Image (spheres, helix red, strand yellow):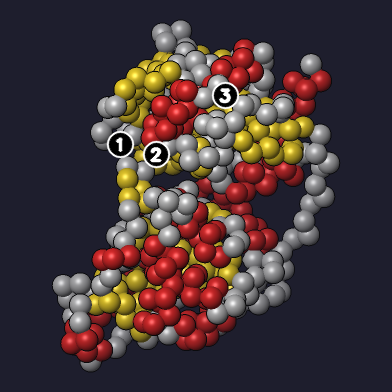
């Protein structure tokens, strides 16, 4: 067993300010000299980019639906090696789980990690009534320890005084409304950390308004956890997998990349917007914002390189934005842009969300990069729709989720697969992609 000081920043609901406060606390603790290991509950890609920049350590997702409870523990234990404190940002409201259940909620993760919870309460438009809310959240599930509360969007010293008269759970902070430090957002959520540093700048606000020493004491009250398992011996790298990495393709789970490396891949980052295709044996093209950079992607010679590689039989695995890039074109309100043309389909941007939620997939067709009959989990979140050719072939049957076409996903061409599903890799999933890369290299 080893002590791992930790706490979870949870919200009463989405939009209460937990992302800003979690990032601000990470920044304040880092500024005090703590080695902070950040985490994010759920499948979100964007918030972890802010965490990673602030803490200088890669933020990890903790999602019981995709990873299983044991997977959550393993990721947490491994990632906290060498850290002084762990800060976990919750998702949605504290008790909001899968289809109205506890599963995959922030509360679920708090119980798995036996971690105290600091509840963020939006106090705007209320005073004494906030205590009724706090007591309701604290008493809803006795197995969840709501140990502190941060009152956000306090309007004035008088407003704070009216709330302070009554105390339900110890207050860890009183944060006054700050419109000047709001992070800009767009159709998939907040802007990435590379585009807006407001989250990091909120650390100074948290330092002034929150009881940092008290929060650290609360984190240290968490009971010890088992020591992390001994790391597996990494397979010596014997293939090179190109990973698209730029402003257009930036949605990757850190665990997925680690599993590819563990399976024997050397990961080679490249920008489809600015680079030619590197000398690699397979490609992994994640999600992101290809629609915002469609003109640049269309002008880059890399798209022609990728098309030739697919025609040559190179294994390619693409998710969401990567699927759009492998298609024939992306149509937006600004124009019609040619993409690689590797897959027989066109992507069309819409003004409303097309799919949002968890995915359960079964591999129904034979492909080089997906093992027939295997299953995996993930999530989908997109504002585009795909228009596949009438004779398009699909590799995935979705037991849950929408995919490309009413439960079908994984468009196939040669040894390339493009899907709306953002997959959470199992070890076997990663090994299959590495094996396909090895077969292509030998061929």
- Mark 2 or mark 3, which has the lower sequence index? 3
The quarter of the picture where residue 400 lies is: top left
Residue 215 vs 120, above or below: the answer is below
Q: How many labels does the image show?
A: 3
> 234 left or right of 412?
right
Q: Do the residues labelled 2 and 3 touch (CB within 8 Å)?
A: no
Q: In which quarter of the image is the C terminus?
A: top right
Q: In which quarter of the image is the N terminus?
A: bottom right
The label nearer to you, 2 versus 3, is 3
Residue on which the image places disc 2: 381
Residue on which the image places disc 1: 353
What's the distance in space between the residues labelled 2 and 3, CA to CA? 26 Å
Residue on which the image places disc 3: 302
- Foreground residue among 275 and 225: 275
Q: Do the residues labelled 1 and 2 touch (CB within 8 Å)?
A: yes
List the single residue furthest toward the top: 391
Measured from the top left, where is residue 21 in percent x and y? 39, 69
Residue ID at (69%, 33%): 241
What's the distance in space between the residues labelled 1 and 2, CA to CA? 8 Å
Measured from the top left, where is residue 318 in percent x and y? 54, 29
Residue ID at (47%, 36%): 248
Q: How crowded is mark 3: few (under 14 residues within 10 Å), some or many (20 or more)?
A: many
Measured from the top left, where is residue 340 in percent x and y? 51, 19
Label ID, residue 383: none
């Amino acid at each position: 067993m080893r002590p791992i000081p930790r706490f979870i920043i949870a919200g009463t609901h989405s939009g209460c300010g937990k992302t800003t406060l979690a990032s601000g606390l990470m920044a304040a603790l880092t500024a005090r000299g703590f080695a902070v290991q950040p985490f994010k509950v759920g499948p979100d890609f964007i918030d972890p980019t802010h965490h990673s920049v602030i803490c200088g350590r890669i933020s990890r997702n903790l999602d019981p639906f995709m990873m299983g409870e044991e997977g959550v523990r393993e990721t947490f234990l491994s990632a906290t090696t060498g850290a002084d404190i762990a800060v976990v940002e919750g998702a949605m409201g504290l008790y909001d789980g899968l289809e109205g259940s506890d599963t995959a909620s922030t509360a679920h993760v708090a119980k798995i990690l036996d971690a105290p919870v600091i509840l963020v309460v939006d106090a705007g438009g209320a005073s004494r009534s906030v205590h009724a809310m706090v007591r309701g959240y604290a008493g809803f599930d006795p197995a969840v320890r709501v140990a502190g509360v941060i009152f956000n969007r306090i309007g004035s010293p008088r407003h704070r005084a009216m709330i302070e008269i009554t105390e339900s759970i110890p207050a860890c902070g009183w944060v006054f409304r700050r419109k000047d430090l709001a992070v800009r957002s767009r159709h998939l959520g907040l802007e990435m950390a590379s585009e807006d540093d407001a989250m990091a700048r909120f650390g100074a606000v948290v330092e002034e308004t929150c009881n940092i020493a008290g929060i650290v004491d609360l984190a240290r009250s968490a009971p010890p956890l088992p020591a992390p398992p001994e790391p597996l011996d990494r397979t010596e790298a014997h293939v090179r997998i190109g990973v698209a990495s730029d402003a257009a393709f930036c949605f990757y789970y850190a665990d997925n990349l680690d599993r590819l490396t563990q399976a024997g891949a050397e990961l080679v980052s490249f920008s489809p917007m600015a680079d030619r295709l590197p000398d690699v044996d397979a490609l992994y093209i994640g999600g992101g914002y290809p629609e915002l950079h469609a003109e640049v992607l269309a002008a880059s010679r890399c798209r022609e390189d990728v098309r030739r590689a697919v025609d040559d039989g190179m294994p390619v695995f693409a998710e969401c934005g990567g699927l759009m890039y492998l298609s024939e074109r992306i149509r937006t309100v600004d124009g019609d842009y040619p993409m690689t043309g590797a897959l027989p389909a066109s992507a069309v941007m819409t003004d409303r969300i097309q799919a949002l939620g968890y995915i359960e997939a079964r591999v129904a067709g034979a492909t080089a990069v997906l093992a027939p009959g295997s299953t995996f989990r993930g999530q989908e979140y997109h504002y585009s729709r795909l228009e596949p050719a009438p004779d398009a072939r699909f590799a995935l049957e979705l037991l849950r989720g929408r995919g490309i076409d009413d439960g079908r996903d994984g468009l196939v061409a040669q040894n390339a697969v493009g899907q709306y599903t953002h997959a959470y890799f199992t070890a076997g999933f990663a090994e299959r992609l590495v094996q396909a890369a090895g077969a292509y290299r030998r061929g």
